[in-house]
Amino acid sequence: MRGPVADEEIFYYYYTQISQEERLLYDAMLALAQNQYNDGSYEESRLVSLDPSSEEFSISYTRAFNALVNDHPELFWVSMSRAVYQCRYYVLPSFGGQYKVIFSLVFPEAGEEGSGYSGMDLRNQYTEEQNQLRSAADVLLGQVDFTQSDAGIALQLHDLLLNCAWYNRDAGFDDYAHTAYGALVCDSSGNPGGALCDGYSLAYVYLLERAGLTAAMVSGTAGSADGELEKHAWNIVCLDNAWYEVDATWDDLDFEVSPSDEGYDLLMEALSNEVYMAKIRHYMFNLTTEEISSFTPGEEYRYTSDRGWVSLLQPSVHIRFSESESESTRDYITPLAPLAEGTYYTWSMLSGF
């Protein structure tokens, strides 16, 4: 019977999109992060043709690192700089002028006077947290009906994620709320499921990858259609060779309604209608890039009764970071993501509503 795939069978999307030389850097960094005995003293070396002192190498390194932490949400502690990569290099004249780049993964806190931690202590801590993340994902994957289609599995995982996570508006920039660990285990304050948009997105990637599906996180800005935009992250998912955009964060809607609000009774009626709320909680599920880039809720998102009608949604936009913005955003992988043009596996098609 089909079920979660083995780690070696996972398809890591961004790895396939970077250059061969960038894959060498990615592989070296991955090997260090996966070495459970690495206390900061282990090293990985690779031969490259790019001059490590050049801006071109800096961009390739950043792209490789971006790809690594987005492909591997389980390395959340690396993405949050709980450990950092360092490298040195030297030229090899006998190898046609290639450069030998030597990587190490160090644990900054371990060297602080009075910290009481060694590099191995920290590495063990992160290994335990990774195990917690895997166990939490296993629980959700154990609730999935793997006899369904890939699209059906993706929908189940979307809904399980929303049941697990909640949007933690109070989390800081260095909080685990930005990671899959935050969404599936807890944020840095110990709040179960406390996550921000990148936490939701990376958790969805992690679940989909382990289910054998292809997915990635993309970043950009999003907000109301009138130009009030903020940095944001969401997902693209590949189903039957077609890509779809999904924003699980925005689907996890939280409405605050007061008796003093105009149309309070109608709003409460809409919020208590299971079919209507199911539609609302999937309005950002499996859209095309064109649709999510300029979303205007149609009549299908209105709740209508003898009291009148109400819509809980507003026009919005999602704009990905472009290649021309990479220097300022330091995001060199979102421009590698494909446009989503899939239109078949909509929520209404999968749910029957």
Image (cartoon, helix red, strand yellow):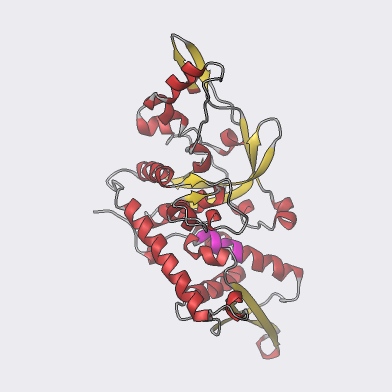
Q: Is residue 115 magenta?
A: no
Q: Residue 311, percent across and down?
A: 53, 21
Q: Is residue 285 above or below residue 24?
A: above
- Outermost residue toward the bottom in this view: 94
Q: Is residue 22 above or below residue 2?
A: below
In the depicted view, which residue is nearer to us: 281 or 240? Answer: 281
**Rendered residue at 68%/39% (across/down):** 229
Q: Is residue 296 left or right of residue 35?
A: right
Residue 294 visible? no
Q: Residue 175, percent across and down?
A: 57, 57
Where, by quadrant of the figure, is residue 103 drawn? bottom right
Where, by quadrant of the figure, is residue 95 drawn? bottom right
Stretch of the chain drawn in magenta: 65-71
**Rendered residue at 49%/62% (across/down):** 72
Quarter of the N terminus within the rendering = bottom left
Residue 92 visible? yes
- Outermost residue toward the top in this view: 306
Q: Residue 273, percent across and down?
A: 39, 23
Q: Is residue 221 left or right of residue 166?
A: right
**Rendered residue at 47%/63% (across/down):** 74
In the depicted view, which residue is nearer to us: 293 or 35? Answer: 35
